[in-house]
Amino acid sequence: MKLIQQDGKSFLFHISKREKGLLFEVLKLYPLIPIAHHRVCQTAAAPRAAESQKLLESALADRTRENKRQLLAMLKQEARLQEADGAHRLTLSAPQMEWLLQVLNDIRVGSWLILGEPNEKKGKPIELNDENARYYAAMEFCGLFQMMLIDAFQRPS
Amino acid sequence: MRTKTILTLAEIEIRPVLEYFPGMAETVEPAVLPDIEKEEQTGAQSELEPGYLVICWDDPVNLMDYVTHVFQVVFGWPKPKAEFHMLQVHNQGKSVLTRESIERAEHYVHQLQSYSLHATMEREA
């Protein structure tokens, strides 16, 4: 996946058939983070903690629903991907890029949770098996796509 | 002999005002007094004060460039400031991003968590 051009508002990417297939397969995993994983406060005893937590979960549930709706629309909208020279051209607006970043990071963090929250700093390596291996792959692919999107944001138009 | 009619300034100031308006009715107490209600507050003072810290915590999964990007988007910070806080998260385990009222702090936590960052709000000690 490579940025071809951008004007600050819309971004045109070249994406190979294999990358496109991979991206779409990974996106089908969304959402992976359970809503209850998000905590608004570290301590439950904090003032208004229960109320704030409820508010956060409700807001995130709404956002997840909306992201899922947009995602399904994107997966169906083949026109967004124009075939050219045996590959594809993917056009995304700046808000769509932000949205895609959120979706990809949900899959990345959700995969990490499924993998048992491995942490090399704390000597907790990834323990792969037949069941969780695909989540390891999803975590790494999401990171790769995220870096490409962030890199595109930082490129001067 | 002419009666003295010109008063000194001191005399004017001490004469009752009504003496100049002899036909004016006296002020009477209104029959119906207006209700005096204390305006209802929308929140406790402590909730409106910027006493809530928005904190981002370190985790081994969020990419450094991604965290920097999110700080730039959510807070509108320039890249050097966003990077400073990202490195603080990475090296010290957490970074206090801002101090706000409870509503604003909640707003920022919602924004950061929609990007799946590990962010919380804590009351300032």
Image (cartoon, coloured by chain):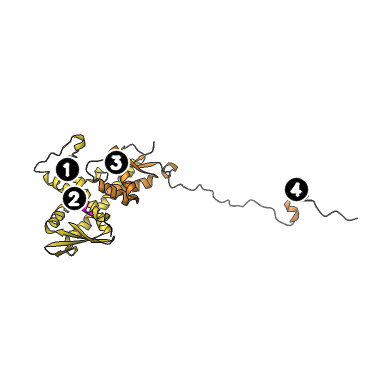
Q: Residues within 10 Å of mark 1 (few under 14, many from 20)?
A: some
Under circle 2, the secondary element is helix
Residue that label 1 marks:
A114
Q: Spatial distance from mark 2 to mark 3, Cα to Cα?
A: 22 Å
Residue B67 location in percent, x, y? 27, 47
Residue A101 location in percent, x, y? 24, 52
Give the magenta-colored segment's residue range: A145-149
Residue B117 bears which disc, if any? Answer: none
Q: Spatial distance from mark 2 to mark 1, Cα to Cα?
A: 19 Å
Query: At 23% across and 54% down in the image, what residue appears?
Result: A149
Query: At 74% across and 49% down in the image, what residue appears?
Result: B13
Q: Quick check: marks 2 and 1 in contact, CB under 8 Å?
A: no
- What colour is chain B? orange
Q: Is residue B95 left or right of residue A108?
A: right
Under circle 3, the secondary element is helix
Q: Spatial distance from mark 3 to mark 1, Cα to Cα?
A: 23 Å
Asked if badges 2 and 3 are on one and the same chain, I answer no
Residue type at mark 4: give it: Ile
Residue that label 4 marks:
B14
Residue type at mark 2: give it: Leu
Residue type at mark 3: give it: Val
Residue that label 3 marks:
B89
User: Does residue A61 show up?
Assistant: yes
Residue that label 2 marks:
A144
Residue type at mark 1: give it: Ile
